Amino acid sequence: MPVALPAEVRAKSEQVLDVRPILAKGGDPFRLILRTVGELAPGQALHLVVGFEPAPLYAVLRSQGFAHHAQREGDVFHVWFFRDGPGHAHPAVAPFEERTGLQAPVEMDVRGLEPPQPMISILEKLVELGPGAQLLVHHHREPVLLYEKLALRGYAARTTRRGEGDYLVHIAPAWAFEHAA
């Protein structure tokens, strides 16, 4: 049964994307979601249909200028992503001349958190800190699923394994690592 466009969603129309079949086959719909968002017409929202609340996606798309509204119907989540304000999204990485200075690194400890909470916490902290943010994250494993999400937001990570179940992940704007090699 189709779900009507909620009044809270500031959009004139929607593009529906049901990713449940992709997930059921073990696939990752992240790139498809980002491509679909990038192809939205002005005034159009993405209506994502998924079997769980896609909380990590909220921070990723918020950084690109999108707000969200979620509704749950049984085991199905309907999440609309729509432009939060006029104009287009800001680029994830500023041109060189507009780059801000690096902030001092902020330490975070996400060891012991259940997935996807480490990713959510990291992405939300980057949004909270703003341009030039750096994190030193203490993690219980290498966060390989985080890397692509960071890259799409203009960040990169360098991970050091310090022992069994002990990783230190340095996250900074990607340009900060360009000259570090």
Image (tube, rainbow, N blue to C red):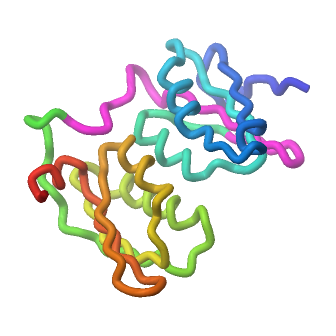
Q: Quadrant of residue 30?
A: top right
Q: Position of residue 133 (x, y in %)?
A: 26, 57
**Magenta-span inclusion, residue 24:** no
Furthest residue toward bottom: 163
**28 w.r.t. 56: above or below:** above
Q: Position of residue 27 (x, y in %)?
A: 66, 43
Q: Quadrant of the C terminus?
A: bottom left
Q: Nearer the viewer, residue 123 or 155?
A: 155
Asked whether residue 39 is in view, the answer is yes
Q: Quadrant of residue 82?
A: top right
Asked whether residue 78 is in view, the answer is no
Q: Nearer the viewer, residue 31 or 136?
A: 31
| Side of 37 where 177 appears, left or right | left
Part of the protein shown in magenta:
70-94
Q: Position of residue 107 (x, y in %)?
A: 32, 75
**55 w.r.t. 166: above or below:** above
At 8% across and 35% down in the image, what residue appears? Answer: 97
| Side of 29 where 20 appears, left or right | right
At 30% across and 32% down in the image, what residue appears? Answer: 91
Q: Nearer the viewer, residue 133 or 34?
A: 34
Q: Quadrant of residue 57?
A: top right
Q: Nearer the viewer, residue 176 or 179?
A: 179
**88 w.r.t. 120: above or below:** above
